[in-house]
């Protein structure tokens, strides 16, 4: 199954259709769909945002209910989250994975009868309350029982008793005395207390820790067989679908070897992008409770839970000091992203599920040009991950920041403001040199799933671990990129070098790419960036004081650069667009007199220099 967040994001791409479907008696009112309530009657109390950053967000101002479109699906249909995901996926035409060959086992249900009523003065209950600091309410919530000096932990799910585990209050030779009902389905402890529409859950190593987390106010489940790896997690085979709906899974395991082993395995199996590791100052959650940790303090531990990003994936903000040092070394009506230039409107769109191949003669500014395109996409909502394999992050970000500022030397305050703007828009695959294609795609997948990145840049193809004459491997990688952008609804830009030409007076085309012809064949778009070096040479001659002929003076009116579109599979236009280049900002402009733009408001940032 897909997570709730993944389904919700797809629903948000069709917000008005979904609003009409779920609330058919409502009507459009400006930028909102209005209805009386989640029951669907006409009215004004409930509003669904139809466009902009809040597209799909709804609120019922009478009842106080709110959420995203998946929450609305649950509320209008009066169903649980898991069922809403299935219905929404069916509506969207999203196929859920089906696995064949799964063993269908017939499990027994617990035969042992137990009573959840208890005597608060018994050794078992005194242990839970006095030693473990659990409240009577918590013990009752979990329907805990006792039997012959043993705690009885019942595993309830969907109103049915699935599994029972027994834990002796006294340890023998320092070892826990544990027993379970035989032949029962291995499952998680605490399902009956998980809110039906919860988007996050905490997994922990023991039942008492789950009860502790519940007492602190966090939905929690305990694994049945403790930490470690291998068969300790056999339960996951049977609980995988139920866990798959959660957007975030917090792993709050013991701070020991067994706990670390469990976390390592669960991250791989549950998905690195949605797992968070909770770090506690004590051995486990219950040890925190015993030490007097408050609810507020424990909330901070959960809030600060860390994800395990791949080492190569870094937020742009990690490089801010390095970029400032570069400047101051001393101290969607159309689905996709438009091009930055008015003359390209209606002609070129960077759509989801597309691969764009960029080429250009060495030194003609193809990476710099693509940077301008990327900034415009970010301004319009794109989240971007750049694998700059030829340029160190500080140099790449310095150039990009110069373009974003529209200035040769933005002030330190302005650089800070631009990097603040980068925070939820830009990530880097931090590796300069030859990148392993397998690792690059692994990190891209994580970035897509974890951060919702929808635009990827590879600069350049020649810096991957593929030999120039290995056409089979080249074709295989391009096919993998095509599979990736199709499966993950994203756009990929890749820079490919052309073959050497006799001179630089003519722009190379899609047939001039170095390597296999499959590169341009499989690409959705093929672009070339060409720089008018002849004009630049005439300008240098003129600046030296020499007179130019009338023909030469006429050539000074030519464009500085050409952007050539040789292929656009999903568009109707191919051709060339002439642009002028501003050296101070590294921006490409519609006409010679156009001023560079500032992608980030700098009204409060003074002392910026042109």
Image (cartoon, rainbow, N blue to C red):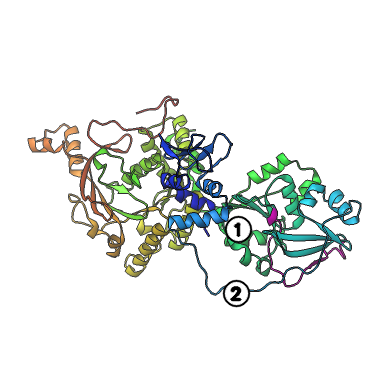
Q: Residue at x 75, y 41 (%)?
A: 294
Q: Please, which residue is most extreme toward the left here?
A: 550
Residue 510 as seen in the image, left or right of residue 318: left
Relative depth, front residue between 82 and 427 = 82
| Residue 312 vs residue 87, the one in the foreground | 87
Where residue 477 sits: x, y (%)?
A: 38, 64
Taking the magenta stretch, the answer to whether it contains residue 159 is no
Q: Earlier in the sequence, mark 1 or mark 2?
A: 2
Q: Is residue 457 above or below residue 50?
A: below
Q: Residues within 10 Å of mark 1 (few under 14, many from 20)?
A: some
Counting other residues with Cα less than 10 Å from the Cα at mark 2, is it few (<14), some (14-19), or many (20 or more)?
A: few
Q: Which residue is mark 1?
A: 243
How many angstroms separate mark 1 from mark 2 (CA)?
A: 19 Å
The local secondary structure at tag 2 comes to: loop
Q: Is residue 256 left or right of residue 14?
A: right
Q: Which residue is mark 2?
A: 103
- Residue drawn at the location 50% of the way across and 43% of the way down: 40
Q: Quadrant of the C terminus?
A: top left
- Give the label on residue 267, or none: none
């Amino acid at each position: 199954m897909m997570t709730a967040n993944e389904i919700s994001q797809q629903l948000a791409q069709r917000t008005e259709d979904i609003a009409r479907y779920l609330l058919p008696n409502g009507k459009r009112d400006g930028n909102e769909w209005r209805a009386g309530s989640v029951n669907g009657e006409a009215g004004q109390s409930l509003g669904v945002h139809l466009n902009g950053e809040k597209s799909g967000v709804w609120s019922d101002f009478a009842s106080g209910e709110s959420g995203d479109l998946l929450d609305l699906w649950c509320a209008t249909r009066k169903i649980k989250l898991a069922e809403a995901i299935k219905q929404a996926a069916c509506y969207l035409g999203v196929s859920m994975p089906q696995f064949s060959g799964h063993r269908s086992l017939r499990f027994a249900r617990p035969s042992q009868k137990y009573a959840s009523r208890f005597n608060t003065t018994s050794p078992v209950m005194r242990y839970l309350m006095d030693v473990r600091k659990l409240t009577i309410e918590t013990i009752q919530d979990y329907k805990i029982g006792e039997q012959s000096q043993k705690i009885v932990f019942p595993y309830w799910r969907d109103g049915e008793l699935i599994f029972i585990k027994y834990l002796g209050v006294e340890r023998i030779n320092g070892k826990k005395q544990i027993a379970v009902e035989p032949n029962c389905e291995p499952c998680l402890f605490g399902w009956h207390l998980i809110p039906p529409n919860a988007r996050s859950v905490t997994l922990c190593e023991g039942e008492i820790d789950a009860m502790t987390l519940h007492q602190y106010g966090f939905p929690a489940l305990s694994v049945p067989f403790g930490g470690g790896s291998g068969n300790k997690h056999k339960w996951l085979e049977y609980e995988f679908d139920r866990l798959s709906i959660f957007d975030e899974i917090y792993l709050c395991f013991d701070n020991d070897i067994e706990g670390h082993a469990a976390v390592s395995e669960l991250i791989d199996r549950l998905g690195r992008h949605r797992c968070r590791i909770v770090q506690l100052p004590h051995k486990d959650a219950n040890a925190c409770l015993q030490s007097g940790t408050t609810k507020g303090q424990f909330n901070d531990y959960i809030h600060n839970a860390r994800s395990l990003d791949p080492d190569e994936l870094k937020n742009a903000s990690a490089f801010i000091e390095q970029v400032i040092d570069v400047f101051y070394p001393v101290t969607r009506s159309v689905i996709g992203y438009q091009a930055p230039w008015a003359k390209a409107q209606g002609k070129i769109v960077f759509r989801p599920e597309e691969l764009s191949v960029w080429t250009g003669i060495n030194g003609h500014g193809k990476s710099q040009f693509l940077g301008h395109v990327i900034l415009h996409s970010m301004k319009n909502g794109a989240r971007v991950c750049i694998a700059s394999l030829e340029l160190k992050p500080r140099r790449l970000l310095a150039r990009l920041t110069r373009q974003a500022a529209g200035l040769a030397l933005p002030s330190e305050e302005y650089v800070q403001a631009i990097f603040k703007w980068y925070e939820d828009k830009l990530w880097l695959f931090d590796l300069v040199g030859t990148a392993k294609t397998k690792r690059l795609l692994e990190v891209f997948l994580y970035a897509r799933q974890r951060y919702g990145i929808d635009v990827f840049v590879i600069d350049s193809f020649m810096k991957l671990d593929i030999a120039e004459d290995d056409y089979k491997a080249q074709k295989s990688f391009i096919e993998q990129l095509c599979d990736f952008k199709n499966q993950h609804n994203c756009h990929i830009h890749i820079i490919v070098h052309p073959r050497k030409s006799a001179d630089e007076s003519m722009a190379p085309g899609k047939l001039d790419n170095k390597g296999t012809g499959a590169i341009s064949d499989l690409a959705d778009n093929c672009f070339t960036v060409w720089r008018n070096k002849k004009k630049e040479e005439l300008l240098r001659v003129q600046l030296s004081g020499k007179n130019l002929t009338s023909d030469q003076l006429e050539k000074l009116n030519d464009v500085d650069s050409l952007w050539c579109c040789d292929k656009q599979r999903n568009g109707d236009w191919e051709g060339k667009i002439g642009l002028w280049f501003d050296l101070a900002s590294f921006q490409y402009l519609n006409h010679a007199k156009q001023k560079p733009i500032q992608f980030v408001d700098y009204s409060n940032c003074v002392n910026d220099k042109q």
